[in-house]
Amino acid sequence: MQESYPVVGNVPTHILTWGKWIEESLGDHKEIVLCITGNPGLPGFYTKFLSTVHECLNKEMPVWVIGHAGHDEARDSPYKKPVPPIEKNEHLYNLQGQLQHKIDFIRKYVPADVKIHLIGHSIGCYLALELLKIPDISERIQHCYFLFPTIERMADARNGFILTKIINPIYRVVQWFYRCFALLPTIIKVWIIYCYFLVTGTPKHYLGTALKYTNPAVIDKVWFMALDEMEKVRNLDLNTIEQNKHRLKFYYGTTDGWVPVKYYKELRQKVPDADAELCTRKIEHAFVLRSAAQMGFMVGEWILKHRVVM
């Protein structure tokens, strides 16, 4: 695995790769796997999932993951460029800015003759669906795999209601709390996170990534994007789905507070021949925490079925 923070769309961006690094020549590789994360967009949470995908593909296809702009700040980076603050840079961190961020990345690092197997998780699915509307990007996309897709009516879901109606009105209090938490010594923060992981059954190897999520500048951007999602992700884009259904795979959960089962059922009614599957394993929306390997093998098998025939 390789990682760094190259500047994408004026923002140092956390990139992880398995196989070829983004700045290396892809040589004979004419396919890559690219994952767009959910929110928060910290690639560190996707290491087990994507390393499993890479293994499932016999390490023959490069696998890349791109974090969201501003969601992951490096203490030290060879690029030596600070992350722009959210003030006066809102256009970089809202939903449209995050979409442009992914467009800039693909245009800069993915050769025009290389096909992309595009994995979207949660809001990453919405961004992937939007990428299909952009001709020079769409023509590079071989297939899309939408995992627990938040592509419609986010504010109407249970978690959306909690976020907009309960947390948002008291957000100043929440903000005060996490800014105070950030002032604690690192050893105390690690201990608190570790205790939380023990209670929730979260693997302790995610401690380092979770610690990054205690940075107030990061949380501000995560929250800013989340509120924009509630406002912008409304009606299902049936037109784009119909036009691209031959290269879309949907995977819905049965215990998902962001995507209720009725969204899956309604999609099947509206697009009967869509490749949509309902999880029978009770995998959670945040599958990367406790079901990463299981999902990795599953997605790897899907990708093998849709490889480019040379």
Image: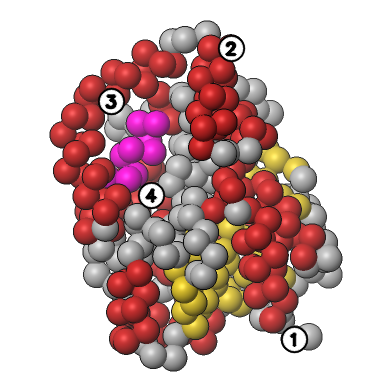
The residue at which mark 1 appears reads as 309
Of badges 4 and 2, the one in the foreground is 2
Q: Residue at x 32, y 19 (%)?
A: 177
Q: Earlier in the sequence, mark 2 or mark 3?
A: 3
Mark pair 3, 4: CA separation: 25 Å
Element type where label 3 sits in the image: helix
Q: Earlier in the sequence, mark 2 or mark 1?
A: 2
Element type where label 4 sits in the image: helix
Element type where label 1 sits in the image: loop
Q: Is residue 224 visible?
A: yes
Q: Is residue 114 visible?
A: no
In the figure, residue 133 lies in which quadrant? bottom left
The residue at which mark 2 appears reads as 187
Q: Amino acid at mark 2?
A: Ile
Element type where label 2 sits in the image: helix
Q: Is residue 63 depicted above or below 204 in this figure?
A: below
Q: Amino acid at mark 3?
A: Val
Q: Amino acid at mark 4?
A: Gly
Q: Earlier in the sequence, mark 1 or mark 4?
A: 4
The residue carrying pointer 4 sits among few (fewer than 14), some (14 to 19) or many (20 or more) residues within 10 Å by Cα, namely some
Tag of residue 198: none
User: Which residues, given as a range, are shown in magenta?
Assistant: 219-227
Q: Residue at x 65, y 60 (%)?
A: 294
Q: Residue at x 52, y 8 (%)?
A: 185
Q: Earlier in the sequence, mark 4 or mark 2?
A: 4
Q: Earlier in the sequence, mark 3 or mark 4?
A: 4
Mark pair 1, 4: CA separation: 34 Å
Mark pair 2, 1: CA separation: 52 Å
Please identify the dominant SS of the magenta region.
helix
Mark pair 4, 2: CA separation: 35 Å
Q: Is residue 160 depicted above or below 198 in this figure?
A: below
The residue at which mark 3 appears reads as 174
